Each structure stands twice: as C-alpha cells, then as structure tokens.
Image (tube, grey):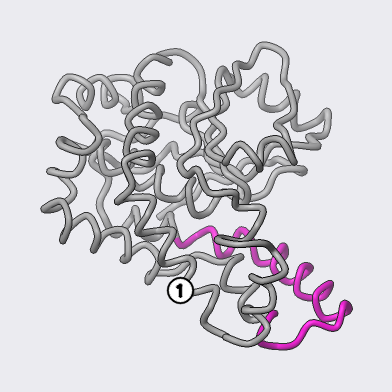
C-alpha cells in the first residue's frame, strides 16, 4: 500500500487517497479526495499549496462546539461545508464535563478505550451519523471538478470512518482500507509524543497518559467495533450502505465515474 502524504506543514495527518486500486483495477484519481486533521492556523504556504492542488470544497466533520472553539481558516476560492458526524461536543472528552472525564482517566486505564468504542458504535448506529455520511457522499457526487478535503480534529476517527465508506464504495480491497485507516498512527506519532511530554510535565499520572495515548491513536478494535455494528445491526456493509445511507446504484456509479480513472 503506497500512501500519498501531502506536504502540508501546518495540518495534521494530510493525505491524498489517490493511487489506491478500486473496482476493475481502476485507480483513484489524484487531486480529488483529501483527508486531514483540522485546518486552522494554516500557513500561507499551505493555503497556496491547497489552492494550487485544486481544492474546491472543505467538509468539516466536527461538532458545532468544536467548530466554534477552533474554526477552519478561510481559503480564497474554497467552499466550506459543515457536516458533523456527531452531535457530541468532543471538546469535553465525551459525556459530562471535562474535569469528571479527566478524573476517570486518572483512575481507569481503559476508560479512553471504552469511550472510543462507544463512539465508533455511535458513528454507525445513530441516525444523525448515517444522514451525515449520506450528505457527504452526495457532496462528493456534486463536486465533479477539483478536490474535496474532509476533516475532523486529528483526521483519524470520524475522518477515518468516512474514508472507509468512500474507499469501500470505490471498490478498494478491505485490507487496504484497514491499512489506510491504521496509517494515522504513523502520521500522528510526533503529535502523541509531544502531547505526552506536556502531560508528564503537568504531573499527570501514567494511567491518564495511557488514556491520552489511546485517544490520540486508531486501533483495529475501534474499526472492528464499527464493522461489527454494521454486520450485526444492519446485515453487512452492502445492506448498510443501501438501506441506512440510501446509496443508490446511480450514486455509486457516479462516485466511481468521478473519482476513479477510466
């Protein structure tokens, strides 16, 4: 699996999905589907790069609270869309206030893991998330020219699941899809290491720091939580895409026509 990393200096986890092999051996086009972390505090270099790369739309997958706390930078000639995958305020670390959540993280080394599994279940099971995914796919079909960039905070969980759906619809092998998802761990190694140093300097215990590493990572178990939910609750990926996301044969074919080489 060859990963196309974008040379952005002020964006976490920036990648172009171009090059992956889809249905009938057709490769995904370059300069079309971009996945990243949040796009705030962009350098002029990065803004110029994205404009010259052909960027036309940015889809923000974050919650209202996240957007207000850390809004996307505006880029001339680029349309910004808000399609939140979850209504949960991710700035609070899940349910309840942040101090209660942090207290739990200092005591239970698996609290972060359990919370992430809950989110991955919710991103599939909840109707809001299903409607958001459908809207994202429709947006892609309605953008035949130029590139679409979609992002959450770190570009790994919500962005990762949206990528799973896109790649599956384009006919990419499931193991390649999984490896693309897991590649976020490599992309975010330095981010996690720097954050861990700060937590240590602030006197946080090892249990808390362990939870933070979990929250800053992706995992087979997280992805499998979503895939198992799809299998058990909805009868498999094809039925989920058809019945819950409302993907018609026409929409699927349109996606492939736009984003796959001929």
**Was residue 203 drawn as part of the magenta stretch in this picture?**
yes
In the figure, 6 relative to 231: above or below?
above
Q: Nearer the viewer, residue 154 or 175?
A: 154
Magenta stretch bounds: 182-208
* Quadrant in the rendering for residue 213: bottom right
Q: In the image, is 28 to the left or to the right of 237?
A: right
Q: Nearer the viewer, residue 135 or 156?
A: 135
Residue that carries the numbered disc 1 in the rendered image? 114
* Quadrant in the rendering for residue 201: bottom right
Category of crowding for the residue at label 1, using alpha-carbon neighbours closer than 10 angstroms: few (below 14), some (14–19), many (at least 20): few
Residue 85's x, y, as percent?
Answer: 45, 41
Q: Residue at x 55, y 61 (%)?
A: 95
Q: Nearer the viewer, residue 112 or 223?
A: 112
Residue 177's x, y, as percent?
Answer: 34, 53
Q: Residue at x 56, y 60 (%)?
A: 94
Residue 68's x, y, as percent?
Answer: 71, 35
Does any portion of residue 24 appear in the rendered image? no
In the figure, 67 relative to 119: above or below?
above
Q: Residue at x 48, y 65 (%)?
A: 116
Residue 248's x, y, as percent?
Answer: 16, 25
Dominant secondary structure of the magenta stretch?
Answer: helix
Q: In the image, is 146 to the left or to the right of 195?
A: left
């Amino acid at each position: 699996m060859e990963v196309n990393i974008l040379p952005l200096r002020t964006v976490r986890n920036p990648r172009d999905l171009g090059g992956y092999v889809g249905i009938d051996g057709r490769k995904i086009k370059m300069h079309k589907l971009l996945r990243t972390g949040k796009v705030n505090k962009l350098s002029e270099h990065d803004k110029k790069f994205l404009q010259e790369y052909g960027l036309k739309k940015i889809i923000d997958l974050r919650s209202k609270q996240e957007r207000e706390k850390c809004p996307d930078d505006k880029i001339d000639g680029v349309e910004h869309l808000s399609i939140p995958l979850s209504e949960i305020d991710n700035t609070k670390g899940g349910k309840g206030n942040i101090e209660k959540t942090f207290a739990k993280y200092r005591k239970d080394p698996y609290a972060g893991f359990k919370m992430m599994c809950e989110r991955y279940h919710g991103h599939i099971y909840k109707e809001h998330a299903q409607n958001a995914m459908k809207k994202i796919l429709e947006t892609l079909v309605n953008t035949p020219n130029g590139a679409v960039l979609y992002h959450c905070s770190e570009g790994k969980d919500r962005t990762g699941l949206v990528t799973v759906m896109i790649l599956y619809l384009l006919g990419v092998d499931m193991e390649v899809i999984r490896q693309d998802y897991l590649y976020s761990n490599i992309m975010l190694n330095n981010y996690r290491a720097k954050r861990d140093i700060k937590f240590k300097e602030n006197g946080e215990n090892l249990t808390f720091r362990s939870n933070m590493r979990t929250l800053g990572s992706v995992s087979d178990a997280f992805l499998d939580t979503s895939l198992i939910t799809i299998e058990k609750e909805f009868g498999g990926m094809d039925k989920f895409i058809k019945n819950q996301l409302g993907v018609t044969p026409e929409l699927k074919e349109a996606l492939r026509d736009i984003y796959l080489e001929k």
